[in-house]
Image (tube, grey):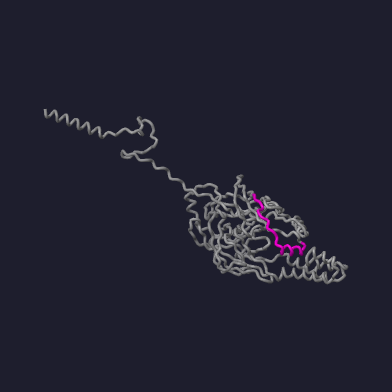
């Protein structure tokens, strides 16, 4: 009997233990295991482990940052009439984001005149004495839309000081124009010619005035009352007040590895100036910064993306002086800083630069800039002195001839009228002498012109390994 009881108790104990080890049913567990699980897994050693997700490819944002300047040239002549008047222009310098062209040359830009500044009483009086009763007003403009690749993109911009003038692209003189050129010199010459050709092609997008049109406009400007025009081809630097996003693009390991490598000798980068410069205010040793505006490639490898920073210094700054002594300016870049902050040393020189047509700039072989006097100063002075001398000829041309000639050199049409109506030969002689003296002083005695590079001026900079040479004074001969 004891054995029977013991056997019953043992069987009961085993049944209870088996019941406790069995898994409890779960609501989330499907009744049938024939279907696919919503969370696939791989089983190792009887335990379920989730499958690892594939690694995400790295991307780089295509963003044109705030502060980037759009270079806009007016596509048509504008007659200034009122605030709010629409204006239209075209992009003349391409815009890149990292290594991608996002706003090509020729893209349409729309804007308007935002302000017409009044003329002071003093200036109005002086201009009236010079037979100009409608002096030119200073105007402000703003651009609000760019049409890139068929897409209308709203923008907020501020036009930077120093822009709003006709501009030409100047390249540095050849280092050895008469001797045999090596491969690097030939490459440099071709790069400068290409940069100048690109600028000329971009300016062909606008209707620049021809010689006949310029003569007509000059004649109209001599009238006592005349309208005010802004010439087609006038270039404005319009800084973006908000960044522009053009999505992202994948960044391969090969591209990431090539960024920041040493550029080959004879390489050139297109940059825009961040620091405004002037031979009148800059000093030797002042820091200079520029931003690479177009990516630099070498056989398809990306060396410097858009946005790479160039740092340099002013080597020579000499302000303009009296006796028409021209201002001179020389800068050099010595550091390149990538967007991640990594910096490296370079040897770079200014090989091409934008300059206002009125400055008459020239670049020597070492990149030194000089503002030459106007080429017409001898002609205009000769005319003024000739008219002034005619006023001393007495009655050679009749009683009114000398007085009219003297008045013409003194105060233009107002002077002519006074000379014709006031019967005084002495007055005509005095006004003739005044006009001749003013012309001689302005063209040969007064201060010359300073070299001015406004912020956002486009530059072509030679980078790479170059032989160090001592800097020479601007304007010195480059012959070796």
Q: Give 302 or 202, whichever is nearer the viewer.
A: 202
Magenta-drawn stretch contains 423: no
Lateral position of residue 150 relative to residue 394, left or right = left
Lateral position of residue 341 relative to residue 227, left or right = left
Q: Quadrant of residue 212?
A: bottom right
Q: From this viewpoint, is residue 204 visible?
A: no
Give the total of numbered labels. 0
Direction front: furthest residue: 121
Q: Quadrant of residue 445?
A: bottom right
Q: Quadrant of residue 269?
A: bottom right
Rendering coords of residue 54 (x, y %): 42, 43
Rendering coords of residue 390 (x, y %): 83, 69
Lateral position of residue 235 relative to residue 250, left or right = right
Q: From this viewpoint, is residue 306 visible?
A: yes
Q: Residue at x 64, y 49 (%)?
A: 108
Lateral position of residue 192 relative to residue 4, left or right = right
Give the position of the C terminus as an image quadrant: bottom right
Rendering coords of residue 43 (x, y %): 34, 38
Magenta-drawn stretch contains 120: yes
For the record, the magenta segment spans 110-131
Rendering coords of residue 105 (x, y %): 62, 51
Give the position of the N terminus as an image quadrant: top left
Q: Give 95 or 183, whichever is nearer the viewer.
A: 95
State whether residue 105 is above or below residue 275.
above
Q: Give 136 or 457, whichever is nearer the viewer.
A: 136
Direction left: furthest residue: 1
Q: Residue at x 48, y 56 (%)?
A: 340
């Amino acid at each position: 009997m004891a054995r029977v009881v013991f056997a019953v108790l043992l069987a009961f104990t085993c049944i209870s233990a088996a019941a406790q080890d069995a898994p409890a049913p779960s609501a989330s567990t499907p009744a049938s295991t024939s279907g696919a699980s919503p969370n696939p897994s791989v089983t190792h050693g009887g335990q379920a482990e989730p499958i690892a997700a594939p690694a995400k490819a790295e991307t780089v944002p295509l963003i044109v940052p705030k502060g980037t300047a759009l270079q806009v040239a007016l596509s048509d002549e504008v007659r200034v009439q009122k605030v709010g008047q629409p204006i239209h222009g075209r992009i003349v310098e391409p815009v890149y984001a990292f290594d991608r062209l996002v706003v090509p040359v020729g893209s349409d830009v729309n804007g308007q005149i935002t302000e017409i500044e009044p003329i002071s009483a003093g200036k109005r009086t002086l201009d009236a004495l010079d037979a100009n009763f409608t002096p030119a007003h200073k105007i402000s403009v703003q651009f609000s839309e760019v049409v890139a690749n068929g897409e209308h993109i709203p923008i907020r911009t501020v036009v930077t000081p120093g822009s709003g003038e006709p501009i030409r692209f100047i390249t540095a003189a050849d280092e050895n124009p008469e001797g045999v050129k090596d491969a690097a010199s030939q490459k440099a010459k071709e790069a400068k010619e290409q940069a100048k050709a690109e600028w000329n092609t971009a300016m062909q997008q606008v209707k620049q005035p021809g010689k006949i049109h310029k003569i007509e406009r000059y004649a109209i400007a001599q009238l006592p009352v005349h309208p005010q025009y802004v010439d087609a081809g006038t270039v404005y630097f319009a800084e973006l007040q908000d960044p522009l996003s053009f999505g992202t693009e994948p960044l391969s390991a090969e591209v990431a590895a090539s960024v920041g490598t040493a550029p080959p000798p004879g390489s050139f980068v297109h940059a825009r100036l961040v620091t405004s410069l002037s031979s009148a205010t800059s000093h030797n040793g002042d820091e200079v910064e520029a931003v690479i505006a177009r990516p630099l490639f070498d056989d398809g490898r990306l060396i410097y993306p858009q946005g790479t920073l160039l740092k340099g210094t002013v080597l020579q700054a000499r302000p303009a002086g009296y006796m028409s002594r021209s201002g001179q300016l020389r800068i050099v870049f010595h550091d390149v800083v990538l967007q991640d902050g990594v910096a490296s040393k370079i040897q770079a020189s200014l090989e091409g630069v934008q300059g206002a047509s009125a400055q008459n700039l020239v670049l020597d072989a070492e990149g030194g800039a000089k503002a030459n006097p106007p080429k017409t100063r001898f002609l205009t002075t000769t005319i003024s002195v000739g008219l002034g001398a005619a006023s001393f000829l007495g009655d050679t041309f009749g009683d009114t001839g000398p007085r009219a000639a003297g008045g013409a050199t003194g105060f233009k049409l107002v002077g002519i009228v006074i000379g014709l109506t006031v019967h005084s030969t002495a007055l005509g002689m005095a006004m003739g002498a005044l006009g001749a003296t003013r012309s001689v002083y302005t063209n040969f005695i007064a201060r010359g012109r300073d070299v001015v590079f406004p912020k956002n001026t486009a530059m072509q900079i030679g980078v790479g390994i170059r032989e160090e040479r001592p800097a020479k004074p601007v304007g010195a001969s480059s012959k070796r």
